[in-house]
């Protein structure tokens, strides 16, 4: 076996790198300016990514360049372009600044959520723990149980997760688990496979463009039964602070630190959640709403939001107090407010049409005309 001195090795690496810069002109169209290989090298050199990953990616570009020199096709180049695009657009070192204000967090929860005092208290306790860790221990990665909101549809599980992100001033990303059929959907497909792409965790981080977003793992109980065990296996790694510091997506093929992510989970029930996953979660049971609570939420939260979204005022559209019990009563057996939200949206939508078409100058829904807006 031949052994090279350090100087010889450096010379060989230099020659190989120079080949990469010169090879591309042999197979790319001259009018395209910089060749695709040159572009990839430029993108890689200007990126802020871990040094080991940058070196590995450079070696991959060199191999592709040599392959193309000797008659290889462009398929591998396409995969490499996709890979470089992903690794250079991940937030390896980018994080947002947390808002550590418990009074603001309480005001936010009270503003966005009616009642549910026990749930709000538990969320505020959770936020307080994270604030103390940040202030006293100077921790970048938090050590606290992951909140797991469990309850029937429409009881506010997702909105509490959104409020948590807003309280901290963090980006919020939702990953839906309903019907998830493979662990590869979470961990990604290797570059050697035809369907090569990153998993949903990495996609969420790129979308957030920070390494410390709030990521909602929504409807954990609704994954495909055939893939449940393998998906739960990935979740154990994602949620375990001892393992998620080096989470490896099969497509990226390089560890990404998830320790600064605040994960929140939801489900309708816990019977299909693996015990090992439950051990890493703190269950918060979401209660159902009674009729009075639905009326209050519809009147003071949902309806004003839809009106505001259209830029309307209370002088242009309103609902008489006597109408609200008639809206809610048929929904008495529903634990949440989703059907009520849809009904209110329908009223606002029909009102918008009447206003825009000039049929009426303003809309006021009462017992006499409510059928026009609910039907």
Image (tube, grey):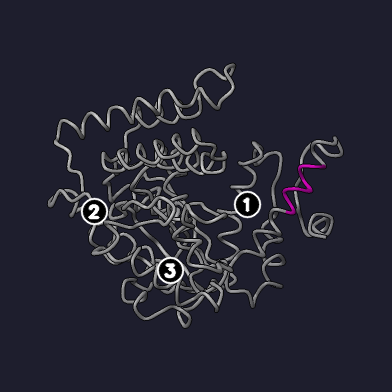
Q: Is residue 61 above or below residue 351?
A: above
Quadrant of the rendered structure where residue 84 is? top left
Q: Which residue is mark 3?
A: 149
Q: Which range is magenta?
A: 346-353
Instruction: Classify residue 70 as left or right of residue 291.
Output: left
Q: Nearer the viewer, residue 363 or 349?
A: 349
Cα separation between marks 2 and 3: 22 Å
Instruction: Classify residue 311 as left or right of residue 61.
Output: right
Depth check, mark 2 against mark 1: the one in front is 2
Q: Which residue is mark 1?
A: 303
Q: Position of residue 199 (x, y in %)?
A: 47, 56
User: Residue drawn 67% across and 72% down?
Assistant: 331
Q: Position of residue 125 (x, y in %)?
A: 27, 62
Q: Which residue is mark 2?
A: 141
Proximity of marks 2 and 1: CB atoms separated by less than 8 Å: no
User: Residue drawn 48% across and 80% down?
Assistant: 272
Mark count: 3
* Residue 54 image label: none
Q: Is residue 156 above or below residue 347?
A: below
Q: Is residue 18 above or below residue 133?
A: above
Q: Nearer the viewer, residue 256 or 133?
A: 256
């Amino acid at each position: 076996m031949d052994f090279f001195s350090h100087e010889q090795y450096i010379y060989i690496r230099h020659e190989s790198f120079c080949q990469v810069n010169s090879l591309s002109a042999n197979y790319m169209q001259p009018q395209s300016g910089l060749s695709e290989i040159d572009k990839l090298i430029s993108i890689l050199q200007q990126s802020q990514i871990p040094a080991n990953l940058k070196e590995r990616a450079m070696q991959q570009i060199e191999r592709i360049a040599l392959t193309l020199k000797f008659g290889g096709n462009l398929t591998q180049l396409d995969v490499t372009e996709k890979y470089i695009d992903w690794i250079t657009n991940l937030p390896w070192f980018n994080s947002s600044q947390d808002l550590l204000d418990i009074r603001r967090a309480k005001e936010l929860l009270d503003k966005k959520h009616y009642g549910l005092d026990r749930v709000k208290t538990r969320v505020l306790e959770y936020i307080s723990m994270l604030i103390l860790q940040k202030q006293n221990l100077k921790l970048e990665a938090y050590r606290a149980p992951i909140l797991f909101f469990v309850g029937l549809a429409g009881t506010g599980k997702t909105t509490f997760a959104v409020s948590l992100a807003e309280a901290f001033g963090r980006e919020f990303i939702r990953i839906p688990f309903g019907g998830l059929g493979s662990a590869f959907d979470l961990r990604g497909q290797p570059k050697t496979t035809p369907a090569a792409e990153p998993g949903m965790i990495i996609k969420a981080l790129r979308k957030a463009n920070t390494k410390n977003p709030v990521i909602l793992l929504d409807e954990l109980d609704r994954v495909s039964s055939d893939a449940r065990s393998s998906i739960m296996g990935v979740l154990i790694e994602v949620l375990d602070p001892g393992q998620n510091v080096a989470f490896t997506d099969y497509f990226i093929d390089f560890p990404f630190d998830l320790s600064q992510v605040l994960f929140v989970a939801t489900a309708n029930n816990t019977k299909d959640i693996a015990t090992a996953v439950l051990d890493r979660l703190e269950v918060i049971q979401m209660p159902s709403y009674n009729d009075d609570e639905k009326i209050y939420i519809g009147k003071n939260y949902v309806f004003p939001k839809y009106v505001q979204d259209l830029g309307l005022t209370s002088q242009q559209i309103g609902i008489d107090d006597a109408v609200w019990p008639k809206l809610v009563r048929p929904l008495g057996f529903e634990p949440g407010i989703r059907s009520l939200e849809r009904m209110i949206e329908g009223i606002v939508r029909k009102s918008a049409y009447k206003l825009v078409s000039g049929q009426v100058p303003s809309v006021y829904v009462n017992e006499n005309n409510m059928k026009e807006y609910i039907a």
